[in-house]
Image: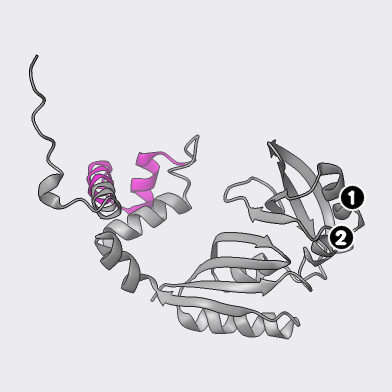
Amino acid sequence: MTSIADIEIPADGTGLGELFEAVPELNCEMERVIASSGHGLWLSGASQSEVEAALEEASAIGEYSLISSDEDRWLYDIEFDPNTVDVFDLVLEQDGTVLSASASSGTWLLSIRVVDRESVSTLYDRLVEQDVSPTIVRLYDLAEEAHSQCGLTPRQYETLVAAIDHGYFEIPREVSMQELSEELEISHQALSERLRRAYRALVTSELNVAEDETTAPPIPSN
């Protein structure tokens, strides 16, 4: 059964450990979508010159390049040295998906999706073997949480997850509805209807609106 794990990992000993030593006030956030051979990471909390000086000096950083910037933060494509502990690659080796990753005060917080709890246990052991001390903050099965809290059926939830994973909600979209429907092996119309019902369930749940309140009142005539 698919599980979600929130894990805290000290940056010391990982690919960005040296950066936090050089720039303690550094903040880091993973970019969900970036076409690169490395990892897309938003870095902030210091000046660009301080950040790049730390990147240049870090022995764990193989290559890096500036991709974009947004006010006081910068998006870098970063490749780690092959001998460095790459937490993201360790997750991928367990057929996991990094849903989000951020770091501040020298500590990573990762939210990952894995096929089962055994994969979390294996990942934990792999990190310990690399002299990294992980802390599992939260671990739960997806079905236990998502369906009951969001009002989604299992198929609706799986469809939304697939849409996110394939970039359907990105701007611009990375996959069309037709392509997504083929991936899910359902018709274009069935996908459209399933997504609309899922949107309705999410909005109803998040806005705490009762089903009988979702019918719009008649628009008064002038």
In the rendered image of this protein, does residue 110 appear above or below residue 166?
A: below
Within 10 Å of disc 2 (Cα), the crowding (few <14, some 14-19, many 20+) is some
Q: Which residue is mark 2?
A: 22
Count how many numbered circles sit on residues in the image.
Answer: 2
Circles 1 and 2, Cβ within 8 Å, touching? The answer is yes
Q: Identify the residue at horizontal 53%, vertical 76% (top origin).
A: 137
Q: Quadrant of the C terminus?
A: top left
Residue 195 within the magenta-colored segment of the rendering: yes
Name the residue type under label 1. Ala
Q: Is residue 75 left or right of residue 187?
A: right
Q: Is residue 207 left or right of residue 14?
A: left
- Front one among 212 and 147: 212
Q: CA distance from mark 1 to mark 2?
A: 9 Å
Residue 96 within the magenta-colored segment of the rendering: no
Q: Quadrant of the N terminus?
A: bottom left
First in sequence: mark 1 vs mark 2: 2
Name the front one of labels 1 and 2. Answer: 2
Q: Which residue is mark 1?
A: 53
Q: Position of residue 67 (x, y in %)?
A: 72, 40
Q: Position of residue 135 (x, y in %)?
A: 60, 80
